[in-house]
């Protein structure tokens, strides 16, 4: 059976977050090492009654598993959600190109806010780690004009006052800790935040 897009998404997030769980270095962020470390008091939660050899039954099982995994990720504040997107960070920093790579490797893409709600969902991590993050918005061929990575015109922006200011010298966009945006060179070490 094909993996549903929803399960695919959740698995991508889970694998993206995995190294960061194993590390257990983010005090307070991951108060559940026992979930991944083969803890001793594993609780058995029964699956719904199986429907033998039935595709619909398989789907019910998958949905049940996904909703439990989502519950874990939400409970531990490892994901934020808005506009049907899931946002996540591994708590690490990288320049713009490496951020693109890491997000792609994880089955997602760099966080790209399309609304105040999505901006807030990204801002949650920027505040938590007190570290700016690059967004999936880049200068177009016209200096000082910015576009989404697919070349589309952003319908939502949240520039800090008097930004963008780079006049062609700052091709990337960073999010400040108040959620506003600044055009910036692409070689800074910023928090990796992806969308799935
Ligand atoms: C820095 C740099 C720019 C930003 C200004 C705002 C001096 O340059 O971060 O991208 O626009 O600060 O003062
Ligand atoms: Ca700037």
Image (cartoon, helix red, strand yellow):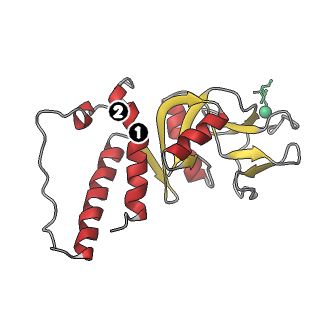
Residue lying at 17% horizontally and 33% vertically, measured from the top left = 39
The image shows residue 194, relative to residue 60, as above or below, that is above
The quadrant in which residue 171 appears is top right
Residue lying at 61% horizontally and 55% vertically, measured from the top left = 115
Secondary structure under the numbered disc 1 in the rendered image: helix
Q: Is residue 81 left or right of residue 41?
A: right
Task: Please tell me in which quarter of the rendered image ligand 2 is found.
Answer: top right
Q: Are marks 2 and 1 in contact (CB under 8 Å)?
A: yes
Badge 2, how many Cα within 10 Å: few under 14, some, many 20+?
many
Badge 1, how many Cα within 10 Å: few under 14, some, many 20+?
some
Q: Is residue 91 left or right of residue 49?
A: right
The quadrant in which residue 185 appears is top right
Q: Is residue 102 left or right of residue 137?
A: left
Residue lying at 38% horizontally and 40% vertically, measured from the top left = 77
Percent position (x, y) of residue 89? 48, 38
Is residue 76 among what the camera can see?
A: yes
Residue 158, disc: none
Work out whether residue 145 or residue 106 is closer to the camera in this orientation and state it. Answer: 106
Residue 17, disc: 1
Secondary structure under the numbered disc 2 in the rendered image: helix
Residue 21, disc: 2
The quadrant in which residue 4 appears is bottom left
Quadrant location of the N terminus?
bottom left
Percent position (x, y) of residue 5? 43, 63
Percent position (x, y) of residue 76? 33, 39
Work out whether residue 70 or residue 40 is closer to the camera in this orientation and state it. Answer: 40
Percent position (x, y) of residue 151? 75, 56
């Amino acid at each position: 059976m094909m993996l549903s897009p929803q399960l695919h998404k959740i698995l991508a997030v889970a694998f993206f977050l995995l190294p960061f769980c194993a590390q257990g270095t983010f005090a307070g962020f991951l108060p559940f090492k026992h979930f991944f470390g083969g803890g001793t008091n594993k609780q058995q939660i029964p699956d719904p009654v199986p429907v033998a050899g039935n595709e619909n039954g398989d789907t019910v099982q998958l949905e049940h598993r996904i909703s439990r995994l989502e519950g874990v990720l939400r409970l531990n504040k490892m994901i934020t959600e808005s506009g049907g997107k899931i946002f996540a960070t591994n708590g690490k920093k990288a320049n713009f190109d490496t951020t693109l790579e890491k997000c792609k490797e994880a089955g997602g893409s760099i966080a790209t806010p399309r609304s105040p709600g999505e901006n807030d969902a990204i801002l949650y991590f920027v505040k938590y780690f007190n570290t700016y993050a690059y967004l999936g918005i880049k200068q177009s061929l016209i200096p000082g004009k910015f576009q989404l990575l697919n070349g589309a015109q952003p319908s939502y922006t949240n520039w800090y006052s008097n930004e963008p200011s780079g006049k062609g010298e700052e091709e990337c966009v960073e999010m400040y800790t108040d959620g506003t945006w600044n055009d910036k060179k692409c070689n800074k070490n910023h928090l990796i935040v992806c969308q799935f």
